[in-house]
Image: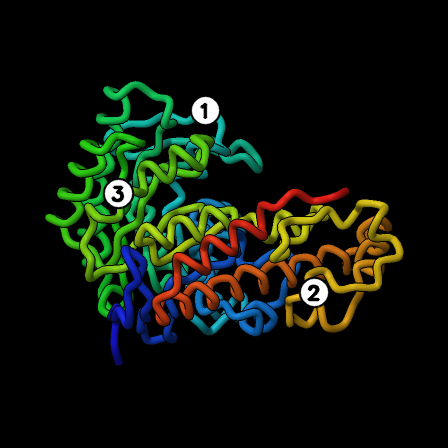
Amino acid sequence: MTRFAFAIAATDGAARTGTITMQRGTIRTPAFMPVGTAATVKAMKPGDVERAGADIILGNTYHLMLRPGAERVARLGGLHRFMGWDKPILTDSGGYQVMSLSALTKRSEEGVAFASHLDGTRHMISPERSIEIQRLLGSNIVMAFDELVPTTSTREVQAAAMERSMRWAKRSRDAFDGGGDHAANNAIFGIQQGALDEGLRKASADALIDIGFDGYAIGGLAVGEGQAAMFGCLDFAPGQLPADRPRYLMGVGKPTDIVGAVERGVDMFDCVMPTRSGRTGQAFTRQGPINIRNARFAEDQGPLDPECACAVCTTWTRAYVHHLVRAGEMLGAMLMTEHNIAFYEAMMADLRAAIAEGRLTAFANDFRARYDAPKGE
């Protein structure tokens, strides 16, 4: 069985479409990974996530190490068995959550000591511990542990964090390689850092390539810098990474973010937006997002998205979903989330087809024109 293989089937400009082949299945790229932070894609059953078109989901090291605990998940047969998902799982390293959620963090060359956001208990994540947790979970794509600093930090701070992240990347790689059967059957990605600075990004990419990884992530974006700044970075960052390996833009994002990043050569994405928006009343449509709580939908007998073929749009009306959400019924969040995940996965399928047929620019321009068109409320 293939441990990890990436094949590019077609290109259109900088964009690529192809497949990642692993023992647990094939991932079609460009791919969107629904986020299953705590061993669940919120408000969805695994079978519904698969039927929506997802080939892979994301789990989170930080959250799972705190609850229910990586060792417990391992005793229960691993994350796939625990949550009932048979396809590939990528786990992020926990670095972002340690920096953003935890109180009283203390960074050192060893790692990050922090207080749990759940109960205040003290923990330490080092590169070695992060890889150990991901191995205990049974992750198929393991992420190296890195240090994230805001893009508004000084260049000196950004450089220091990037250089430490590269030292941690080597320790992560070494820890992964010591993982026996898990390492022999799964993959590890390194994470490029360097904020918005082209020189720092190049130094980071060179260091990661020297270590050697199965795939490469672009980290440190989608943290408040805005789309224009992010795209400015993506005009050079993907090209600094190996063309024959997958490129993963972490934590992105809005539909137009993803379309623009695909145009710039990115292959993989994850974001909580479709699930979080589903729970707060926002539905994604090809005509742009709508707030289903709005009174104008109270007697609207059309589907959430007239162009969507998902089970929600072919069964229920906007009026019904509006009622559920306004009434606080949990089915409302479930239906909204199912539709949003289906929308994202359909968008990825459309992007793959457009690249394969050499019409990505036309597709992307039409998508943006319709999605961003002014809406009457």
Q: CA distance from mark 2 to mark 1?
A: 48 Å
Q: Amino acid at mark 1?
A: Leu
Left or right: where does residue 251 sit relative to residue 241? right
Percent x, y of residue 153: 34, 21
* Quadrant containing the N terminus in the rendered view: bottom left
Return the residue at label 3.
Answer: 237
Q: CA distance from mark 1 to mark 3?
A: 32 Å
Residue 167 visible in this rendered orientation of the protein? no
> Above or below — where is 227 with respect to 254?
above
Mark 2 or mark 1, whichever is nearer to me = 2
Q: Are marks 1 and 3 in contact (CB under 8 Å)?
A: no
> In the image, what residue occupies the spot 46% across and 31% down?
224
Q: Sequence order check: which comes first, mark 1 or mark 3?
A: 1
Mark 1 or mark 3, whichever is nearer to me = 3
> In the image, what residue occupies the spot 72% across and 55% down?
333
Camera-nearest residue between 208 and 254 = 254
Residue 83 visible in this rendered orientation of the protein? yes
Q: Sequence order check: which comes first, mark 2 or mark 3?
A: 3
Which numbered tag is attached to residue 306? Answer: 2
Percent x, y of residue 144: 28, 48
Percent x, y of residue 213: 20, 55
Q: Sequence order check: which comes first, mark 2 or mark 1?
A: 1
Return the residue at label 1.
Answer: 104
Q: Amino acid at mark 2?
A: Pro
Q: Amino acid at mark 3?
A: Ala
